[in-house]
Structure formats: C-alpha cells, structure tokens
Amino acid sequence: MAAAKKILVIVESPSKAKTIGKFLGSRYKVIASVGHVRDLPKSKLGIDIEDDFEPQYISIRGKGDIIKELKKEAKNASKVYLATDPDREGEAISWHLAFLLGIDMESPCRIVFNEITSKAIKEAIKHPRPIDLRLVDAQQARRVLDRLVGYQISPLLWRKIRRGLSAGRVQSAALKIICDRENEIKAFKPEEFWVITAEFVKDRAFTAKLSEYRGERIKVTDKEHNDRIINELKSGRFTVKSLEEKDRMRKAPAPFTTSSMQQDAANKLNFSTKKTMLVAQQLYEGIEIKGKGTVGLVSYIRTDSVRISDEARAASKDYIINRLGQEYYSDNVYSNRKKDVQDAHEAIRPSHIDLEPDTIKDSLSKDQYNLYKLIWSRFVASQMAPAKYKAVNAAIENGDYIFKASGSKLLFDGFHKVYAVSREKDEDKLLPHLEKGEELIPSDVSGEQNFTQPPARFTEASLVKDLEEKNIGRPSTYAPIVATLIDRKYISKEKKSLVPTELGFIVTDVMEHYFKEIADAGFTAQMEENLDDIEAKGIEWKSVIRDFYGPFKEELDVADSEIQKMELEVELTGETCEKCGRPMAVKHGRFGTFAACTGYPECRNTKPLVQTIDVKCPVCGKDIVARKSKKGRVFYGCSGYPDCTQSYWNKPVNRKCPKCGQLLVEKKTKDSKYACSNSECDYKE
C-alpha cells in the first residue's frame, strides 16, 4: 500500500522550515526556497521598455537544484501551501513559486502568520487564501522602478566618474540628506552667548539660571554684557517670586516598529542597522531553547505599525498584574501617525511574554540576548502605567531679572521598572523647601561663555529616524542603504558619525544637477505613497512606472550628453612599483581599495593596500601594518607575513613594557591607556 501523500509547506529559510516542521508533525513536509527563486537578470536591464515595462524574470543562477527539488516535492504532495513572509516581498516570492510550480494563484494556496508559534502556524493552515496580487504588484513596481534608476544611472557614473559607482532611488536621496547636513556644518558660524547662574544652599545646593529681563527672554551675547549684569545682581537681593508645584507623568513608549527598534539598538547596544536586522531575523525564525526545542521568540520584524493583537494585549495584562502588581498595568492603545498599508502587521513583540530574557539567557548568544531583552522590555513597558513625578518650578527675582530653577521627585516608577529611557536633567533632582517672598543668599553668581554648536552629523540611528519622518524608503531598506553608501565610499563611518566623502559630494552634485527628482527627498516620499497606493487602492502598477519614466529618460539623455569625463585627483601611496619603478596609487574596486601602478595598462602590478603605524616588528624588524580579518575586524600584523606571523588585536605603540620587554598596545579603559601585549604580563598604565 502506497504511503499517503503529505501536505507541502514552502518557506524562505531553512531555519524557519526547521522550526515550523516541529509544530506541524508528520502529515506535513516543510522545505525552504532559500529566498527568491526568480528575479530580474543581473547581466542586463531585464525590463522590456518597449513592451510597456514588462519584467523579464529568469530563474536565479545557482538555484537550479532547489527549484528541481521544489517541483519534485510539489508533484508528490497532496496540497501545497506557500508560507513566505507576510509582506510584499514575501507575497512576490510566493507568486514566483506558484508560477514555477504551476499552482493556481486564485486557489487558497497562501498562508500567513505574524509569529512562528505552534498556535499561529496551525491557525494559518486553517485559513489559506489566494495570492494577493495587489501586494505582488506593489513589489513589482518597486523592483522595476529601482532597476530602471539603478541600471541606467550607474553605468553613466561609471563612464563619467569612476568604475564601480552606483546610484539608486532611495540611496541617492539618503546620500543627499547626509551631504546637506555636512554643508550646513561647514557653513555654520558659531555665535557667542553667556549663561549666568546663581548658586544657592538651603538644606541642599541648587542652581538657578537667568531667564528673563523685564518680562522678556534674555540673551547675553558678550563678556561686557555678562559682567554688567553680574555687577547689578550682586548689588541687588534674590527673593522667591513664585512657586509652581504639579504632578507630571511620563507615558510609556509604544512597542517597536522596525525603525524604532533599529534606532534603540543603535543607541543602547551600539548595533548597526544591518546587525540589528540580522539578529532580529534569527529571533523571529527560531532559537533552540533548552527544554523547549526550537522557539520563534519575536513576531515579524518588518513593520511600520505600533498595533498589537488582542491576544498579545491580554497576555501582557496577565503578566504585568501577576508579576508586578495591578498598579503597574495600564490599558495603553497606540495608533500609527500615518495610515499605512503595512498596518497589516503588528508591532514587534515577544511571541511568548512569559519567556523572560534572563530565564533563556544560556540558550542565546550575547547579541541575541541583548536584542531580545530590548524587544521584550519595550513591549512589556508599552502596556505599563506612566512614571509619576512631583515637579517644582521656582522663579527667583533680583530687580528686573528673573532666574528659574526646577526639580522633580520620582513618585512612582511605572514603566521605568522594566525599560530604561534617557532621563531629563531635572528628573529626580529635588529643590529644597522654599517660601514665596523668601530671600535667598547666593553662594556664587557667575557667567559662563558658550558658543552655539553646528547641527550634529547623522548617526545610523538619527538617519533612520530622518528617513522615516520624511517617508523615504521602507524599514527593511534602511540597513542596506547605509551599507551600500559605505561600500561605495560615498560616506565613511567615524566613530558613530556618517561623514560624506569627496566622492559622495561629487555623485550628489551630479544627481542634484541632472536628476533633481531622484535626489529630492520630497519626490522620493511621494513615490513611496504612489507605491503604497498600488497595494491600498489597486492602482495599475505600470501606470506609476509610465508616469515616472518619460521625464526620467529625458534627464538621462541630457546627462549623458552634457557631463564631461571627470578626472578625480590621483591619491598616491608613497610607494614605488617594484616592477617598473613608477609611483603606486590608491585605486577603488568592487572588493575595496588596493594599490596599483600608475603605469597601467603597460604595467598591471597591484597589491593590497596596507597602513603602516610607524612601529617595527619585535621579531623580524619589518613594519607593523593595519590589516583586516575575514570578518572585517582590524588587527595589526607584520608586513613580512607569511614569513613572520607576529600580530596584535590592539594597536601597538613604539614603547616596550618595563616588566617583560614586549611591545605596549593601546588598551583604553577607565583606569589605563596602555597595556602589555604579552597576555601573561599584567602591566598597564
């Protein structure tokens, strides 16, 4: 007797397949497509512009064996469910799978779930639906639009500026935002101002700051003005003019969206957006938890919504009341700032609120634990009562001058119990008991010179926030945008700041002059709305492409005829070519920077570009140079490698340890700046 046919479930990733397979049992077979199976070709535009922008999809190179297996399993299955991610990209993957496997798109073949839990998966199996072609069309429009821009502007930049450059619809707008900020910083002219404060002691010390003069806000702009005011104040009397005491509340933040998660992880965990999404994907797809098997720990991680399900709300209520107490619970409801089609998804939250981070810490990597704790804490806090403060504001007068002092006392910690937020300076800083009309004797009255500061450079967190506020791109695109800008050498990352390079400015100038709309944040945001309307209102996707392409093609032709070939300044390495004696220059390729002979094409000598640090190898006497490991981490090794393998993770300095004679390395901590490179020596200074 033949074995009964199984129901086939297709997901994107093998780890997701493994987790779901454990929930569904022996009647089902769960396999992975390993991402997209069909896409536009990499070697050409892949869009038939003459045939109304028809995409020319092909099976992705290298996916032949996977497609063959998918077809075989689908043929032998009693039914096929497509269970890719619950967003436009996931819907498009299901659409391509249905095409390859000959599945009727209008049949109930598609299942979706917001979290990978047994209950969610089994519930999804009960409610299959047809493929949503509006979602597919929205994804197709975005893919075709980005391909038209990228594959037609990028070759132009290659010809006119430098090989390996690229432009993109969202990428170019983001780069312009970073360059505009840098221009603001360069154009900024600092203005002098003085802050005048009075120090008082009554039970405890407190500070009041000069705020008003004759009922108007005062601005002290130079030392002469500052000294004149201080002399007047010293001859006058300080008295308490008014006191205002009130209760103040600080409400809990909403649960995470993709962008707010990226921002918080950058600020609190020092994660890049790319790292945040990588770790979050692992938490979503499932982690092997001791005693529980593979568990999907968080809900779907690509969402613009702050909404949560009734079930999650009820679970959080039970948890907070039972673990923390009734007074900590608050039935908070959050709404999205803009009505968005992505509201189909919940906010990011833990799949099982009772899986506290510390109880499963041993099953998680350090990064997984830190991000899970952040998501878990933020969600629990979002359903908690506000923090309550007793705030006191005092106005202290001296003749025509008014000083202000403020303080507050935390009365009830509320959501702070589980989730830390940045606190204002006057929070938990008490003022002493004061009486209206009371005279105060200052211990000091002084002025401090200050200068206005330029706007701060963008960090990944602040750029993500700005892109979201301007409605540029989507949360899932923020991580690759920053990575691409860095890879193309359009920006560099200095500590946390994103700094545009000369090349970034050149590309932005070209885009602004010839492709003004592509680089414009407002146009890019409007295009996002048009793409959303394809899904939300059923607008024909090709009409959006037609409206865009006519003016864009005209700009492309003008740019091609007008832009002159740019000769970027050659950056010499200071070395000479060992083959022909000509100078070596810094070159940029697909895989980063390298040194190449300026005699090209007669001499084709190239070698890795290394940075010397003016320290000699203690083993062989050759230069120590900065290198990068396979994972991109900087280390310091002998330039004589592979003959000499001496290396250091910390940067060596030209000084020897007085205890053992080995090189000292930079190892900055709270109590030291240098340490011995010998792991068996404890010397530091």
Image (cartoon, rainbow, N blue to C red):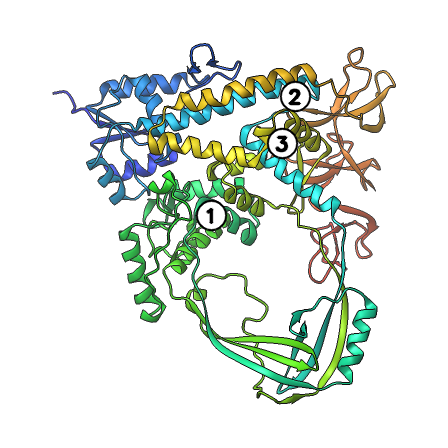
Labels 2 and 1: the sequence-earlier one: 2
Residue wearing tag 1: 368
**Helix, strand or loop for disc 2:** helix
| Total numbered circles | 3
Labels 3 and 2: the sequence-earlier one: 2
Amino acid type, callout 2 = Leu
Near mark 2 (Cα within 10 A), the count class, few <14, some 14-19 or many ≥20, is many
Near mark 3 (Cα within 10 A), the count class, few <14, some 14-19 or many ≥20, is some
For the residues carrying marks 3 and 1, which lies nearer the camera in this image?
A: 3
Residue 680 seen in the figure: yes
Determine the residue located farthest toward the right in the rendered image.
581
Q: Position of residue 254 (x, y in %)?
A: 42, 55
For the point 34% across and 16% down, the residue is: 68
Q: Position of residue 370 (x, y in %)?
A: 49, 52
The circle on residue 520 is none
Q: Is residue 269 left or right of residue 100?
A: right
Residue 35 seen in the figure: no
Quarter placement of the C terminus: bottom right
Q: Quadrant of residue 329?
A: bottom left
Residues at badges 3 and 1 in contact (C-beta under 8 Å)?
Answer: no
Q: Position of residue 559 (x, y in %)?
A: 65, 19
The image shows residue 584, relative to residue 232, as above or below, that is above
Amino acid type, callout 3 = Asp
Q: Position of residue 88 (x, y in %)?
A: 38, 31
Amino acid type, callout 1 = Gln
Residue wearing tag 2: 157
Relative to the observer, which residue lies in front, 415 or 605?
Answer: 415
Residue wearing tag 3: 487
Relative to the observer, which residue lies in front, 381 or 146?
Answer: 146
For the point 43% across and 10% down, the residue is: 51
